[in-house]
């Protein structure tokens, strides 16, 4: 029997090439080996969003990118977190076995509280409990994580252990599936590619937009003139070539070091590589975008399938916790 994987991502709208090379490609590959449940975690997003005007659009755009990248509703359950409200009930129940001290110690809570001192809401503190509910509601045994997310999963495992020790074996302890996501730096060459730093290339950008954006990328700062030899090892454009022009990497190194190629030509080559890699993705995305009803159906069907599992788990949890059904 295949193991069940759960992973959630906050709805951040159109995805960029950093998301693609990291989480999304990994999601697609896992589908071959596991029964996967992928969730757009809109309730989690509310902990940091003060304005929700774009929330529905962001969910839709993200799902278009997931589908175009190869997430397949025939193979995986794709849905939106709030469409299966049982998760909120389980969150409340799990909060009863989670010591507050565990949550107040979480580094990301402290960091978020620092970042948004005007909005240190209860949801921020309870975030790891909701995350645990996301995973165990579906009794997922495997969670793909990067090294930096391991402490969060460990906290989820502690909550599971505590619940199981009080109420009897109920949830599997979710195991991490460590994934070495490549660190994709943004166009400024210093920070991770992301919306926070406005240094990203959207997957759905047109070839012309992609070229324009790549042209703004920071290269080797020591290379001031076309005749200066370059240092590819410090250049982020070169790093991106590894992903999008891998067969030409040796050639680019030699040409850069000998000033045989200029940065403008090198960037044009990178834009060409990105556009070639994403050509089929963009065609698929346009075709899904032309069928909004199909996307809505995928989400609706995903929520129904997820809810079947969720209801069963929640009934078991309530019974174990001594909560009885309301008399008919
Ligand atoms: Fe970077 Fe390419 Fe310029 Fe070399 S030629 S510094 S690899 S952009």
Image (cartoon, grey):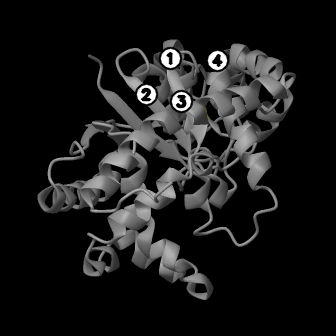
What's the mark number on residue 277?
4
Q: In the figure, is residue 277 to the left or right of 169?
A: right
| Label 2 vs 4, first from the N-terminus | 2
The residue that appears at 42% across and 62% down in the rendered structure is 91
Q: Quadrant of ligand 1?
A: top right
Indicate the position of residue 285 as horizontal and vertical percent values: 76, 23
Give me the C-alpha separation between circle 2 and circle 4. Answer: 25 Å
Q: In the figure, is residue 291 to the left or right of 67?
A: right
Question: Badge 4: how crowded within 10 Å, few (<14), some, or many (20+)?
Answer: some
Between disc 3 and disc 2, the foreground one is 3
| Label 3 vs 1, first from the N-terminus | 1
Between disc 3 and disc 4, the foreground one is 3
Q: Are marks 1 and 2 in contact (CB under 8 Å)?
A: yes
| Label 1 vs 4, first from the N-terminus | 1
Question: Badge 2: how crowded within 10 Å, few (<14), some, or many (20+)?
Answer: many
* Residue at numbered disc 2: 36
Instruction: Give the vertical position of 299 relative to 162 (above or below).
Output: above
Helix, strand or loop under label 1: loop
Question: Badge 1: how crowded within 10 Å, few (<14), some, or many (20+)?
Answer: some
Viewer-side residue, 314 vs 20: 314
Give me the C-alpha separation between circle 1 and circle 4. Answer: 24 Å
* Residue at numbered disc 3: 305
Image quadrant holding the N terminus, namely top left
Q: Are marks 3 and 4 in contact (CB under 8 Å)?
A: no
* Residue at numbered disc 1: 75
What's the mark number on residue 218?
none
| Label 1 vs 2, first from the N-terminus | 2
Indicate the position of residue 30 as horizontal and vertical percent values: 40, 23
Give me the C-alpha separation between circle 1 and circle 2. Answer: 7 Å
Viewer-side residue, 100 vs 193: 100
């Amino acid at each position: 029997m295949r193991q069940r994987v759960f992973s959630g991502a906050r709805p951040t709208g159109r995805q960029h090439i950093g998301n693609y090379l990291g989480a999304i490609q990994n999601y697609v590959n896992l589908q071959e080996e596991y029964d996967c449940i992928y969730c757009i975690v809109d309730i989690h997003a509310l902990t940091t969003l003060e304005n929700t005007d774009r929330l529905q659009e962001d969910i839709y755009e993200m799902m278009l990118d997931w589908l175009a990248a190869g997430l397949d509703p025939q193979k995986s359950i794709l849905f939106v977190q709030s469409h299966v409200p049982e998760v909120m009930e389980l969150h409340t129940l799990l909060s009863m076995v989670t010591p507050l001290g565990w949550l107040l110690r979480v580094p990301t809570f402290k960091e978020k509280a620092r970042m948004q001192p005007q909005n240190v809401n209860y949801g921020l503190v309870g975030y790891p409990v909701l995350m645990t509910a996301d995973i165990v509601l579906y009794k997922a045994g495997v969670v793909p994580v990067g090294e930096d997310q391991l402490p969060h999963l460990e906290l989820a495992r502690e909550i599971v252990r505590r619940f199981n020790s009080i109420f009897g074996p109920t949830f599997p302890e979710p195991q991490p599936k460590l994934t070495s996501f490549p660190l994709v730096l943004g166009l400024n060459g210093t920070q991770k590619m992301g919306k926070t730093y406005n240094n990203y290339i959207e997957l759905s950008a047109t070839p012309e937009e992609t070229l324009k954006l790549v042209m703004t990328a920071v290269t080797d700062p020591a290379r001031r003139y076309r005749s200066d030899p370059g240092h590819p090892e410090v250049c982020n454009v070169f790093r991106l070539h590894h992903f999008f022009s891998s067969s030409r990497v040796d050639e680019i190194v030699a040409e850069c070091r000998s000033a045989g190629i200029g940065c403008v030509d090198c960037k044009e080559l990178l834009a060409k590589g990105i556009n070639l890699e994403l050509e089929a993705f963009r065609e698929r995305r346009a075709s899904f975008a032309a069928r909004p009803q199909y996307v809505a159906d995928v989400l609706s069907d995903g929520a129904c399938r997820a809810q079947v599992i969720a209801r069963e788990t929640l009934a078991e949890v309530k019974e174990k916790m001594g909560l009885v059904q309301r008399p008919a």
